[in-house]
């Protein structure tokens, strides 16, 4: 990829830009970024990452890859604006819920549209990126995109039918895990810790747990059983979570997020 055009300059766009710039495979000046109105935001990204602010969507015309990083409810409008500037660029959507077919329709049948669900840790090369491409995307174009994304984390190719599920547990996952950590941090503070000190231990606990799961190739339930001795502290805590329905609440939260992704897809691609 020689030239990127990023449509949308919000938090997901920034995470992606930060990851790509740190990966060092593209000159930041060849990353053109546009948004709807907040010019100061483009200048800020330019100052921090060295990207080039684009004052018009017309700059997308000479990009190889266009990143669609607008909110799902802005996607159809954004694609209409982009349509006159499309030729053979690959479009890579980050939007939750929006089906490839709807994006193809909004662009007058552009064949090279790939749908992804990244998450915020792409900013530090630790993202989880689910990706789905229709057969209209030639394999060499897809390979180049996957190679670029691989520098930002773990890429998993899935069927598009699973995209709303991936959105629910990996796109929204950092939010869910942070919510658990919020509660753990509150408890730590109530037990006498300063928040910053508690956070140091909590963050390292998450990182360490994730590494152990991966390096020892364990399932989460295996690891939980290993660290839970009868009548010990973990046992006592897990019993409370079980009696309060925490497990079922998490299952429901992920299910609801997947349904919400699907609802957004329907709501925001409705014609007329
Ligand atoms: N945040 C996450 O954790 C996350 C994770 C995975 C996927 N995503 C997906 O990433 C996408 C962006 O989310 P976000 O959280 O980054 O949103 P955000 O912070 O609200 O940013 C949205 C950006 O889109 C711009 N925009 C809106 N309409 C536009 C148009 N017609 N042309 C050009 N730019 C336009 C906005 O510009 P102005 O500010 O000028 O209005 C803003 O820069 C969403 O589709 C979301 O589903 C997000």
Image (tube, helix red, strand yellow):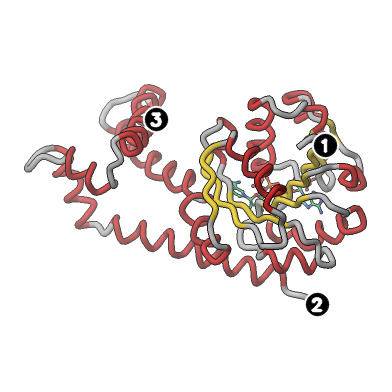
* Residue at the (79%, 39%) spot, across then down: 4
The dot on residue 272 is 2
* Residue at the (64%, 27%) spot, across then down: 23
Q: In the rendered image, which residue does mark 1 sit on?
A: 32
Q: First in sequence, mark 2 or 1: give its number.
A: 1
* Residue at the (87%, 38%) spot, across then down: 54
Q: Position of residue 149 (x, y in %)?
A: 62, 40
Tag in front: 2 or 1? 1
Dots 2 and 1: beta carbons under 8 Å? no
The dot on residue 177 is none
Q: Is residue 271 above or below residue 26?
A: below
The CA span between labels 1 and 3 is 34 Å
Q: Position of residue 142 (x, y in %)?
A: 67, 49
Q: In the rendered image, which residue does mark 3 sit on?
A: 203
Name the element at disc 3.
helix
Tag in front: 1 or 3? 1
Q: Which image quadrant for residue 200?
A: top left
Q: Is residue 190 left or right of residue 98?
A: left
The CA span between labels 2 and 1 is 32 Å
Q: Is mark 2 within 8 Å of ligand 1?
A: no
* Residue at the (22%, 46%) spot, across then down: 222
Q: Residues within 10 Å of mark 1 (few under 14, many from 20)?
A: many
């Amino acid at each position: 990829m020689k030239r990127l055009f990023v449509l949308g300059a919000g938090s997901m766009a920034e995470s992606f830009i930060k990851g790509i710039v740190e990966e060092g495979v593209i000159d930041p000046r060849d990353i053109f970024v546009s948004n709807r109105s907040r010019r100061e935001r483009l200048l800020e990204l330019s100052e921090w990452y060295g990207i080039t602010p684009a004052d018009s969507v017309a700059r997308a015309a000479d990009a190889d890859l266009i990143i669609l990083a607008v909110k799902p409810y802005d996607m159809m409008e954004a694609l209409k604006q982009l349509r006159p500037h499309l030729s053979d660029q690959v479009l890579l959507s980050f939007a939750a819920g929006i089906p490839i077919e709807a994006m193809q329709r909004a662009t007058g049948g552009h064949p090279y549209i790939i749908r992804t669900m990244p998450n915020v840790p792409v900013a530090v090369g630790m993202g989880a990126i689910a990706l789905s491409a229709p057969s209209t995307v030639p394999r060499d174009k897809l390979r180049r995109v996957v190679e670029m994304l691989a520098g930002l984390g773990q890429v998993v190719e899935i069927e598009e039918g699973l995209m709303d599920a991936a959105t629910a547990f990996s796109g929204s996952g950092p939010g869910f895990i942070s919510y658990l950590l919020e509660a753990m941090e509150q408890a730590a503070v109530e037990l006498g810790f300063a928040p910053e000190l508690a956070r140091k231990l909590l963050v390292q606990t998450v990182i360490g747990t994730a590494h152990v799961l991966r390096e020892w190739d364990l399932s989460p339930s295996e690891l939980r059983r290993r660290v839970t001795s009868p009548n010990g502290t973990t046992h006592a805590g897990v019993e409370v979570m079980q009696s309060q329905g925490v497990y079922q609440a998490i299952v429901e939260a992920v299910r609801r997020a997947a349904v919400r992704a699907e609802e957004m897809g329907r709501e925001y691609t409705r014609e007329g």
